[in-house]
Image (cartoon, rainbow, N blue to C red):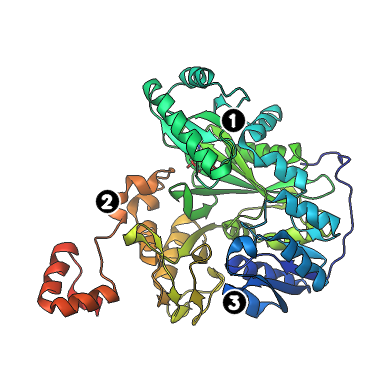
Amino acid sequence: MTSEHSPEQKPQHVRFDTLLVANRGEIACRVMRTARRMGLKTVAVYSDADANARHVREADEAVRIGPAAARDSYLDVNAVVEAAKRTGSGAIHPGYGFLSENGAFVEALDKADITFVGPPASAIAAMGDKSSAKARMHAAGVPLVPGYHGNDQDDALLKAEADKIGYPVMLKASAGGGGKGMRVVESTEAFQAALDGCRRESKAAFGDDRMLIEKYLVQPRHVEVQVFCDSHGNGVYLFERDCSVQRRHQKVLEEAPAPGMTPELRAAMGDAAVRAAQEINYVGAGTVEFLLDADGSFYFMEMNTRLQVEHPVTEMITGQDLVEWQLRVAMGEVLPLSQDALTITGHSFEARLYAEDPEQDFLPATGTLTRFALDLEGAGLGTDQVRLDSGVESGDVVSMHYDPMLAKLIVHGVDRNAALATLNRALAALDVQGVVTNRAFLQRLSTHPGFKNVELDTRFIERNEATLFAPRQYRVEEYASAALIGLGQLAHECESDSPGIGMTAFV
Ligand code: ADP
């Protein structure tokens, strides 16, 4: 899809030979990998907690930007800009999270004449507020979930709107994100109390209590479209990802393409996504998130104005390097491929490996990774089938300061079944010692018959809780203390709480 240049989108030729990556963990390592391949010098930034982190070790140069707390380091605009100036970095890639969707950061870079590898501040602002984004998307003809996103926030009016939409409805904070400030309301009687609660939560989390109301879709799938625009007015979509497997509105397993898509639906969603991006004069990589209803209707939810965690599944099925695309677009080049030249080959899954304990309500875990290895050869798998995007190696310390995601395991196969079989073998071949992870939980998800049968919707985990959560298991410290109490008692507990798991499994 091509449109005329808007006045804001002047073709530009930008030269930079040094790229600063304003992030940490797996995404910093992943961005630097492509930058290096393109002949760029790479600069890492780090907090005191990350002085020996993998992204620091892998960069050509690294700059300390502050203490462990993210707000004093990775979120400190001035510290990052200063680091770029000091190292002669002509461009900054923000990764995801941290400063990636911060308009003030983009403006500071514009002022300092440093290229931001991402969209203009105006595009970030346009999608930052859910209510005004929806108004803008409505004007562009992008389908929305039936609902109310107006400025009038009078209690009686909101309730009348909810009644009109029909229950259940979902209340959402206009300024919300990260799954916060959202509530499902089942009936007109329950509306006022839910509104009060949601407003309080939203005020506390975002300093803003404006609400929007949407029809609550009972069994939707989360299907998002990868879009790309250059500064010459071109826009394409790189197909879709299904991210329906979520826990508390957070994605756990993602796949591309979305199972069951018809070419017509794919084109309709892709066109709507490109229209959404072009409506706000977007430049770079973006993701337009839709809810897909059982009847094939799809509705715009939001646009993420950055590279997503799950972008590798798109890379696996298209054979494209999205970070290379981002860097080329930032250099003022036209998009590497037109829509007609983009194709889907095979199927891909991504599993997110977290340092967290599913048996303890997903409590983040810390410690030293005494071993972190993926034995592909032993599993009979090739590097063309499996990719491990990791921010850690054996010997690294996992602290409690940042997001607990350690790595992403990404697989490719000729079709969904082949890719799923590979995912299961790769998960089994992943050996992580020293820190508790969700690996076994990912295995239970990926071997679940419902998942194999594509019984996908955003409540998949909730619906299958009984089979996805293992019976209580014991950890080393618990065995040790239990051993002190008496081996006899331990044996008894193993029998009563962990049916099917013999003592030998623990030693
Ligand atoms: P956030 O910005 O906080 O992540 P989103 O608006 O993107 O919030 O919604 C997060 C998730 O909540 C979606 O992926 C979906 O699972 C669920 N959700 C959001 N809106 C609806 C809706 N109208 N009906 C059903 N589920 C919804």
Discs 2, 1 touching: Cβ within 8 Å: no
Of the residues shown, which amino acid type is indicated by label 3? Arg
Q: Is residue 216 visible?
A: no
Between 228 and 480, the one lying in front of the other is: 480
- At mark 3, the secondary structure is helix
Sequence-wise, the earlier of marks 1 and 3 is 3
- The residue lying toward the viewer, choosing from 87 and 412, is 87
Residue 229 rendering spot, x and y as whole percentages = 76, 48
Mark nearest the camera among 3 and 2 is: 3
Is disc 1's CB within 8 Å of ligand 1? no
Camera sees residue 250: yes
CB atoms at circles 3 and 2 under 8 Å apart? no
Graded by Cα atoms within 10 Å as few (under 14), some (14 to 19) or many (20 or more), the crowding at tag 2 reads few
On screen, 153 above or below 95? Answer: above
Sequence-first tag of 3 and 2:
3
Mark 1 falls on what kind of element?
Answer: loop
Residue located 60% across and 40% down the image: 302
Which residue bears the numbered disc 2? 466
Residue at mark 3 to residue at mark 2: CA–CA distance: 38 Å
Say left or right for 148 vs 424: right
In the image, residue 491 lies at what x, y percent?
Answer: 13, 73
Quarter location, residue 111 = bottom right
Position in image of residue 125 (x %, y %):
71, 42
Residue 256 position (above or below residue 351): above
As helix, strand or loop, the secondary structure at mark 2 comes to helix
N-terminal of the pair, mark 2 or mark 1, is: 1
- How far separated are the C-alphas under marks 2 and 1? 34 Å
Residues at circles 1 and 3 in contact by the CB criterion of under 8 Å: no
Residue 144, label in figure: 1
**Amino acid at pointer 1:** Leu
Residue on which the image places disc 3:
54
